[in-house]
Structures are given as structure tokens and as C-alpha cells.
């Protein structure tokens, strides 16, 4: 039975990937600084800041999926040096431990943030990268580590650039959980600017599918893939209205100036949508969960019913 270790495995994305790989008959080890909601094999408490802890957890594993990172534009901009330390030095530790432990292949979770404000949409993997945040810069550094460790140590890799992945129990400043949290509490969701910023949103289960296909396909070695849902492009304003409608509540939107958001007007990215043509052609990747179905999943399963914690997701998933 193949064995995979998932850093950041207690987060929303990590939990979905762990569950997906368990269904594919993998032995699963999640590695995180917090306890997961559910254990899908073995859980190891640990930080990516210590190579020896990572190495011990990786012993006997065949593959690594590296999700662990400091997250969020506002949080990472407010703590830039901490972000760079965790996301760059921590990632180097993951690659070092992978080499020492004889890992066959690593998946590095990057982000669509690396593209910055695109010249055109949808974005393809060969488009220029113009990061606007320290978080995006740290993710680009991780991508370069993947290439360097392949060259120096022959460690196979694939890079996944996630586009706005969401799912149940995702917390923090991500837009869908933030809107759902407000609406379920009977509060008007806050929209920054005019709300015309456009994104495509990918349910976490579809994201897990993309990771699995990239790991298992030799043609994916050394390649970068956009993983998202190209059928769900929607403005932030329309997204908030959809969440209100699906919740059955009667609420108005609250508009706040961009200057009071987690991005300044100059650093906002106004339109970002994914081309998944490469992932579809090379991997056979096809997202299957539509936006309405995905939002209903978040509304029905979310932990707000048991008391919400914004603290638990600070540092542990991509």
C-alpha cells in the first residue's frame, strides 16, 4: 500500500486530500501543528520549521503533499518576515526532509496569487507571474525550490496553483467562509469596493482530485498545473447575493471601501479566472461540483453550528 504524508493535513484542503487518498487505498499520514477534525490514518503533531521532525514523520512514506504555509493576504502582509520564514524556510525543510527520507515525489501547493493582475483571462500556466503580496512571493520561492531539488537531488515534483479553493470548515478571511459565517449569524456580508472583482471558485473535493491526478501521473512530473473550476466565474457581489439566497435569509449587502479591506486599491486583483485546459489534457482533471452545490455543502456542514474559531487555520494549509 503506497503511503503519503500531507503537511498542513488538519486544514480544510488537507482534510479533503487525506480523505480522497484514503478512498484510493493509500496509507495516510497528516502532519500539522493542530489536531485534525478527523484522522484518516495517522496524525503527527509537528511543525515544518524542524527538519528532524519532518524526517521522522516521513520515514516509510512514498510521497509528500506540501500544503503547510502561513495564509491570508492581511495576516501575511502584517507579519511579512514571519510569512517568509515559514513559507520559504519551512518549505526548504520539507524538501530537505523529503530527500533524506527517500521520498519518490512531492506535490507543492502554490497559489493563483503568483499571477498577480493578469494580462488576460483565463490564465494559463505559461502566463507571466507578477506577485503583488509577500504571500505570493513566498509561493514562487517554493516553486523554485521544487525545481532546484529536482535538478540537484532528482526529487520528482508537480506544482499545483490552486484557484480559490473553498469547502466546509475553512476559516479565516477567505471570501466564501467569511460570507457564509456572516449570513448564518444573521449579519450582512461585507463586500469590499464595488464587488465587481471576479474569481472562479473550486470546491475542495475537486482540488483533492487534481492533487491525486498530478501525483499519480508521470507526465505531470516537473510540471505546473492550474487547479480550479473554470465554470464558476462570478463577481464577489453576485457571490454574496447567491449565498444569501441559498441560506434562505433576507439580508442586504454591506459595502466597504477597498482601503478598509485586506488589500489596498492598488494591490487588489480585479479579475482572475483559471484555464484548466492543461490539467484536463495531461491529467484528465475535471471538476464536478458546481458553485451552488458547493455553497450548499459549506452552509450545511459548517462548524459555525458548533461555535466558530478563526484562530485554528492561521498557519497550516495552503
Image (cartoon, rainbow, N blue to C red):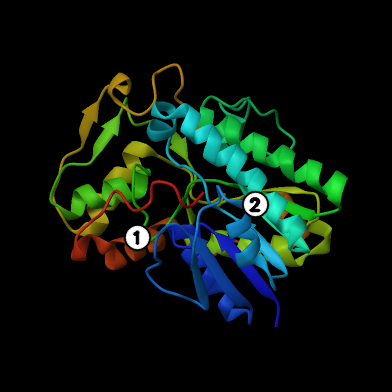
Q: Quadrant of residue 169?
A: bottom left
Residue 260 is labelled as none
Residue located at (52% from left, 78% from top) = 41
Q: In the image, what residue occupies the spot 16% across and 40% down?
A: 252
Mark 2 surroundings: few (<14), some (14-19) or many (≥20) residues within 10 A:
many
In the figure, is residue 207 to the left or right of 144?
left
Left or right: where 190 falls relative to 168: left
Q: Nearer the viewer, residue 293 or 192?
A: 192
Q: How many marks?
A: 2
> Regarding mark 2 in the picture, which secondary structure is present there?
helix
Disc with the residue nearer the chain's start (1 vs 2)? 2
Give percent across and percent down for residue 107. 68, 56
How far apart are the two marked residues, 1 and 2, measured between alpha carbons?
26 Å
Q: Residues within 10 Å of mark 1 (few under 14, many from 20)?
A: many
Q: Quadrant of residue 298?
A: bottom left
Q: Is residue 277 visible?
A: yes
Is residue 125 in view? no
Hey, which residue is sitting farthest top in the picture? 266
- Which residue does the numbered mark 2 point to in the structure image? 94
Reply above or below: 178 against 287: above
Q: Is residue 193 above or below residue 280?
A: above
Q: For mark 1, what is the residue?
A: 169
Instruction: Give me the residue at 45% from left, 36% from top.
Output: 198
Q: Where residue 282 appears, x then y in whole percent?
A: 78, 58
Report the quarter where the N terminus lies: bottom right
Q: Point out residue 274 in the picture as x, y percentages from the top left corner.
A: 60, 43
Mark 1 against mark 2, which lies toward the viewer? 2
Residue occupying the point 68% across, 69% down? 59
Q: Residue 62, image x and y in percent?
A: 73, 70
| Proximity of marks 1 and 2: CB atoms separated by less than 8 Å | no
Mark 1: secondary structure: loop
Amino acid at each position: 500500500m503506497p503511503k503519503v504524508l500531507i503537511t498542513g493535513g488538519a486544514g480544510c484542503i488537507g482534510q479533503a486530500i487525506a480523505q480522497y487518498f484514503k478512498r484510493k487505498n493509500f496509507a495516510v499520514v497528516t502532519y500539522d501543528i493542530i489536531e485534525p477534525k478527523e484522522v484518516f490514518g495517522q496524525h503527527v503533531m509537528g511543525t515544518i520549521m524542524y527538519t528532524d521532525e519532518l524526517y521522522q514523520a516521513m520515514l516509510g512514506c512514498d510521497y509528500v503533499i506540501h500544503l503547510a504555509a502561513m495564509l491570508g493576504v492581511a495576516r501575511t502582509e502584517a507579519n511579512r518576515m514571519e510569512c517568509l520564514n515559514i513559507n520559504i524556510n519551512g518549505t526548504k525543510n520539507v524538501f530537505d526532509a523529503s530527500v533524506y527520507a527517500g521520498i519518490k515525489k512531492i506535490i507543492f501547493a502554490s497559489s493563483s496569487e503568483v499571477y498577480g493582475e493578469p494580462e488576460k483571462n483565463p490564465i494559463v500556466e505559461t502566463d507571466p507571474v507578477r506577485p503583488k503580496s509577500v504571500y505570493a512571493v513566498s509561493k514562487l520561492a517554493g516553486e523554485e525550490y521544487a525545481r532546484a531539488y529536482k535538478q540537484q537531488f532528482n526529487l520528482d515534483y508537480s506544482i499545483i496553483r490552486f484557484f480559490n479553493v473553498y469547502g466546509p470548515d475553512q476559516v479565516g478571511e477567505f471570501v466564501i467562509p467569511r460570507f457564509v459565517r456572516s449570513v448564518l449569524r444573521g449579519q450582512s456580508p461585507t463586500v469590499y469596493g464595488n464587488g465587481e472583482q471576479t474569481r472562479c471558485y473550486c470546491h475542495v473535493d475537486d482540488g483533492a482530485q487534481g492533487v491525486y491526478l498530478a501525483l499519480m501521473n508521470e507526465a505531470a512530473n516537473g510540471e505546473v498545473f492550474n487547479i480550479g473550476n473554470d465554470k464558476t466565474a462570478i463577481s464577489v457581489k453576485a457571490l454574496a447575493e447567491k449565498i444569501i439566497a441559498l441560506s434562505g435569509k433576507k439580508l442586504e449587502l454591506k459595502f466597504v471601501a477597498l482601503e478598509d479591506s485586506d488589500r489596498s486599491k492598488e494591490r487588489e486583483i480585479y479579475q482572475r479566472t483559471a484555464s484548466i485546459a492543461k490539467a484536463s489534457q495531461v491529467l484528465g482533471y475535471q471538476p464536478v461540483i458546481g458553485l451552488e452545490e458547493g455553497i450548499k455543502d459549506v452552509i450545511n456542514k459548517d462548524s459555525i453550528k458548533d461555535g466558530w474559531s478563526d484562530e485554528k487555520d492561521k498557519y497550516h494549509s495552503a
